[in-house]
Amino acid sequence: MRTDSSALVLPPGVHRLWLGKRRLFFLALAAVTVLCFFALDLKFGDLIVPPAYLKNTKEFFSAAFSPALNYQDAAAAATSEHILTRAASGALTMIRVAAGALALALPTGLALAYLSSRSWWENSSLPKNRRILLTFVSSAARTLATFLRSVHELLWAILFLASLGLTELTGTIAIAIPFAGTFAKVFGEMFDEQDLSTANYLEEVGASPLAAFTAGIFPRAFPDLLSYTFYRFECALRSSAVIGFFGVESLGLYIRQSTENLYFNETWTYLYTLIALLVLFEIWNVRIRAHLLSVSGR
Amino acid sequence: MSHAPSASFAKRHGMTSSKDSAPAFALHEVTVDFQSTRALNNVSLEISSGEHVALIGPSGSGKTTLLRTLNGSQSLTSGEVYVNGQALTGLASKDLRNIRRSIGWIPQSLGLVPNLRVAQNLMLGSSGRASLWDLLRKLTFPSRADQLSALEHLDRVGVGEKLFERTSSLSGGQQQRVAIARTLFQNPTSILADEPVSAVDPARAVDLVKLLTELATENGVSLVMSIHNLELARRFFPRLIGLRSGKVIVDSRPDDLSQAEADSLFSLTKAEILSGE
């Protein structure tokens, strides 16, 4: 059965196994990145802090060892609530904004993900006109999801500040819009990447494509969806802090105000509150993810 | 739209035109092409109600395509398929789904959802008959009657104690049994099984095929199973249909299958080996 090696001829075509079109493209991309770095005219010397700023930097980091338990401004101490109460209230506002944003973004993202996902109907025996309609709906949902997430929450916040003012609602909506787009994209991809064996089985026994999706794809994707949702809640918490910098009453605003007034001990009180909040949430998140992984992997 | 098989076909295959006495499945000159590959080549056969049939043949011989043709999920290039006397050609997808509801399906991959409880996987068997709302209710808040029914079917296949276990925690053999129980939960009139024992060890394969044929007999349902193991097929099935390159080359009782016929089924040509068939 073995052929004489002298009679073997390589098939025609290109045989550069190490440098195909795809690798060339990525090499070009890497070259553009390097060129961009030089085009920015970055100087490592700029990283050296001028002496005037060095004093503030030193004060800022020194304050980390003695966070304020009272306001540094005597007038504020006399008139305002206790600084720890204020920090806790700011943290609660962040949680409220993040939870509100997720309450809007999650169902919207889930609905868009379902509409943009193609796996549940692409291989089914639907009539041609229904397929054309679903292809259109899927493309429209993907376009809408791209539009929603193409504008950052900070830009949405600036836009909404003008119309809604400095309220928690501004922060909530500003975060919800791009998060809905991100949920739509990631959830849609999660749906499309699921093993279709259950959905195929369900169609074989007479279930509609919608039932096959709901009972065959969604339950398989559920642990991933839940895990990602928790991660996005953590992102929403961080975003709500950043949006506070624009004036929405929360930890972010307090951090900005105390920094601007050079009350660095107060800044660290708020920063520690923020860090504690995120660490506590991360511990909860890790526990839930570990539980989900053990459940799905058992 | 309801049709009996054509008169000539009925005469040739000993069928009557009455729907009540119609065979469970009938194929009339069915051809299925996948681009340049002919998966089924002018296949005509009939499977009576309650009959047990083993489809045998090497990988790529057309067994899975034939099974998918029997429940109407495979588009035909030409020919006609009848299920309980009803022609499938031209049926709307909703009507086809109605027919599939009474045909159980055990895929090679089993199609179980690993992160659901065993009881929930059994509920999926009723997905064809239930509305979406009912299906969601069964998956989340199954009634006591549904739970008892699931337990009864699991008990019949020997894994009753696993009712509320997570499916991923079950062994491969137990999952095979859950897939069989799920099919019984569907309450089908026929069962199509696509290589259900290809991934289990020989001893377990014997147990599972025995269980499936016994349950099919108890329930009076037709059973069509594709299987690689000729000895298993001979031992448990009264009729063997052998496929090779999309053609039926053997259709006989196990005792009538000659060694030459068996050899012709499973010996591969050099071209078939190289093409991966």
Image (spheres, coloured by chain):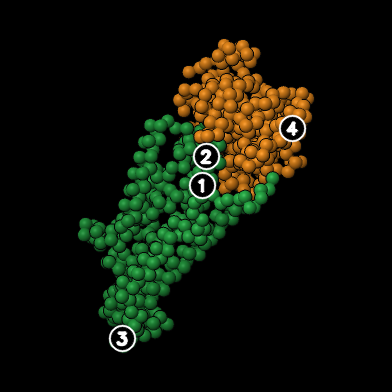
Chain colours: A green, B orange
Residue B209 image label: none
CB of mark 2 within 8 Å of CB of mark 4?
Answer: no
Q: Earlier in the sequence, mark 2 or mark 1?
A: 1
| Callout 3 amino acid | Pro
Q: On the image, numbered disc 3 is attached to which residue?
A: A50
- Tell me the distance, in whole angstroms, between the alpha carbons under discs 2 and 3: 64 Å
Pick the front one: A234 or B37: B37
Q: Secondary structure beneath disc 3?
A: loop
Image quarter of residue B228: top right
Pick the front one: A138 or A172: A138
| Callout 1 amino acid | Gln
Q: On the image, numbered disc 2 is attached to which residue?
A: A199
Q: Residue at 43% across / 42% down in the picture? A: A118
Q: Earlier in the sequence, mark 2 or mark 3?
A: 3
Q: On the image, numbered disc 1 is attached to which residue?
A: A194
Mark 2 Cα-neighbour bin, 10 Å: few <14, some 14–19, many ≥20: many
Q: On the image, numbered disc 4 is attached to which residue?
A: B263
For mark 3, name the chain.
A
